[in-house]
């Protein structure tokens, strides 16, 4: 009881005694209730889906994804894809999802690459020389944000890690590292940004490293060469940071929104921090929820997959 008094910072006992004590409640994964797609549609007016590990993996659609999106389209439901993938413009991503058999329009896809434009505007980066590690669409995001895209071997003021693939990785990474060191040695300011902070992604039958790991690699190299420069860090734009969730909320125009994602650190914690409920779907990266997860950042619901147990034979 004494701890409860101290926790409230006053000399009076809380009215409901020790149960009113302020403390962090930790999640017990066994107490997270399961939910079905039908129940989600009853309870929420709009659904936000992560892409990888929820609807698709690197080489195809996940079971039930095409049927679910077809149903949502048919019922005129409000939904968006909220993805950290910054390697494809929405139109490119939509075309790829359509090849996987998913009936998905570009207008429903929100990517972390789309966060570059407001980031460039807010930080005065328009017109700056930008090296971009990533495929053509990553460079397009930077150009649309107002950056002047240059080769990673040239002098640049901004380094954008758009993706881990779609370019000669080691050649460009080494060139960017060398150019970065030259700029820093010369006392020139550099701005480092990675739209996609994800470390890994689920492939077809395995996993791969994602752009966030490449940012960590650069930060490791920078820390080794400039141990006192704690400012040489990447700005990480996408989930779990709130701007992409805020953008989605503006578009759906309702607060009865739920996020469906496979990663605790990005989808679940990010959605909960933005004030949304969240479904942890067990078909992707996060295989278990650690017991030290604060309950207010843990999943509201869990779902084994888009197809409920026993329904596989119906697909
Ligand atoms: Mg995912």
Image: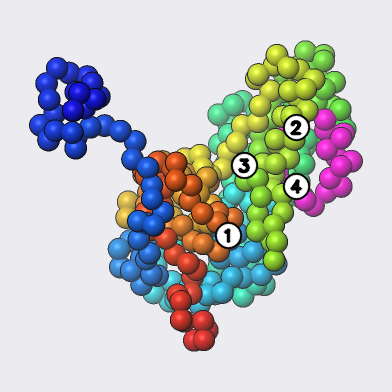
Distance between mark 4 and mark 1 Cα atoms: 19 Å
> Could you say which is closer to the camera, residue 201 or residue 188?
201
Q: Please report whichever mark, 3 or 2, sits nearer to the chain's N-terminal start.
A: 3
Disc 1/disc 3 C-alpha distance (Å): 16 Å
Separation (CA) of disc 3 from disc 2: 13 Å
Of residue 223 and residue 52, the one placed in the foreground of this image is 223
Query: Is 233 left or right of 49, judged from the image as shown?
Result: right
Numbered tag placed on residue 164 in the rendering: 4
Q: Which mark is residue 284?
A: 1
**Considering only vertical position in the picture, is 143 above or below 206?**
above
Residue 68 in the image, given as x and y percentages of width and height: 48, 73
Q: Which residues are magenta?
A: 159-177
Query: Mark 4 or mark 1: which is in front?
Result: 1
Mark 1: few, some, or many residues within 10 Å (few <14, many ≥20)?
A: many
Q: Is residue 110 among what the camera can see?
A: no
The mark found on residue 197 in the picture is 3
What element does badge 1 sit on? loop
Residue position marked by numbered label 2 in the rendering: 218
Question: Residue 23: where, in percent of width, then height?
Answer: 30, 33
Residue positioned 65% across, 20% down in the render = 231
- Whether the residue carrying mark 1 lies under 8 Å from ligand 1 is answered with yes
Residue 151 part of the magenta-drawn span: no
């Amino acid at each position: 009881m004494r701890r409860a008094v101290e926790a409230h910072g006053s000399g009076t006992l809380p009215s409901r005694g020790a149960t009113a004590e302020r403390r962090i409640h930790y999640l017990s994964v066994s107490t997270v209730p399961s939910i079905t797609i039908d129940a989600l549609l009853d309870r929420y007016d709009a659904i936000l889906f992560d892409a990888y590990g929820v609807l698709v993996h690197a080489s195809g659609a996940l079971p039930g994804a095409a049927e679910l999106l077809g149903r949502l389209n048919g019922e005129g439901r409000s939904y968006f894809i909220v993805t950290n993938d910054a390697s494809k413009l929405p139109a490119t991503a939509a075309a790829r999802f359509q090849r996987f058999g998913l009936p998905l329009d570009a207008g429903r896809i929100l990517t972390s690459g789309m966060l570059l434009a407001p980031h460039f505007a807010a930080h005065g980066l328009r017109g700056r020389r930008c090296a971009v590690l990533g495929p053509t669409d990553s460079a397009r995001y930077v150009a649309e944000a107002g950056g002047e895209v240059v080769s990673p071997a040239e002098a640049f003021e901004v380094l954008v890690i758009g993706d881990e693939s779609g370019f000669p990785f080691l050649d460009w990474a080494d060139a960017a590292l060398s150019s970065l060191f030259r700029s820093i040695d010369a006392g020139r300011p550099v701005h480092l940004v990675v739209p996609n902070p994800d470390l890994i992604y689920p492939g077809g039958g395995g996993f791969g490293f994602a752009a966030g790991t490449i940012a960590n690699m650069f930060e490791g190299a920078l820390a080794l060469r400039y141990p006192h420069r704690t400012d040489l860090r990447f700005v990480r734009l996408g989930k779990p940071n709130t701007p992409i969730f805020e953008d989605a909320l503006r578009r759906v125009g309702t607060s009865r929104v739920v996020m469906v994602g496979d990663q605790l650190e990005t989808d679940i914690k990010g959605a909960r921090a933005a004030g949304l409920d969240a479904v942890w779907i067990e078909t992707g990266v996060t295989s278990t929820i650690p017991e030290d997860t604060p309950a207010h950042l843990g999943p509201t619901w869990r779902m084994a997959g888009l197809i409920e147990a026993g329904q596989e034979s119906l697909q």
